[in-house]
Image: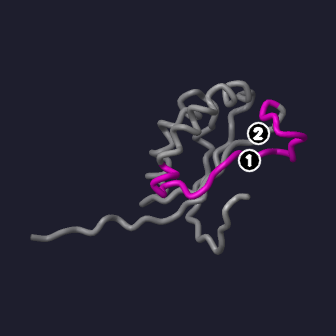
Amino acid sequence: MSSSAAPAKFEFLVIVPDKPGTLQKRLEVRAAHLANVKPQFENGTYKMGGAVLNSVPNGTDPSTFDFHGSSFVAEAESKEAVLEQLKDDVYVTSGVWDLEKAQVFPFLCAFRTAKE
């Protein structure tokens, strides 16, 4: 009886820009997005993630942020597997993220700390 090893996984740095004019939609579906990525974070598939901004915000009200998109580190077998995971994200299905312009790079993390 032979057994095959699970495919090797690698970390990928993912940068996904928002489509123009999607701030309100982003804010509307943000809670659903965060709820949906929580299991991937808890099981170790997603290592870290968050918003990418065009400028440093003045304050903490997300409705005033100048969002560029999102970035995260994911563990997967391939770039294609990462992109496949993204297709069901509410930011994609609601038209916030521009998946065609997503950048996915193999990533070798040199150091990592917890956010304080």
- Identify which amino acid the numbered label 1 is placed on: Val
Rendering coords of residue 94 (x, y %): 58, 27
Real-space Cα separation, disc 1 to disc 2, in angstroms: 6 Å
Quadrant in the rendering for residue 115: bottom right
Residue 103 image point, x, y percent: 61, 52
> Disc 2 designates what residue?
67
Q: Is residue 45 above or below residue 16?
A: below
What residue span does the magenta drawing correspond to?
40-63
- Asked if the residue at tag 2 contacts the one at tag 1, i.e. Cβ–Cβ closer than 8 Å, the answer is yes
Q: Which mark is residue 68?
A: none
Q: Quadrant of the N terminus?
A: bottom left
Residue 47 counted in the magenta span: yes
Q: Residue furthest right?
A: 58
Tell me if 107 is positioned left or right of 1 in this view.
right
Q: Is residue 60 above or below residue 1?
A: above
Q: Secondary structure at mark 2?
A: strand
Image quarter where the C terminus lies is bottom right
* N-terminal-most mark, 1 or 2: 1
Q: Which residue is mark 1?
A: 52
Front residue of this view, candidates 5 and 106: 5
Q: Residue at x 58, y 40 (%)?
A: 99
Question: Observer-nearest residue: 79 or 51?
Answer: 51
| Mark 2 crowd level (few <14, some 14–19, many ≥20, 10 Å Cα) | many
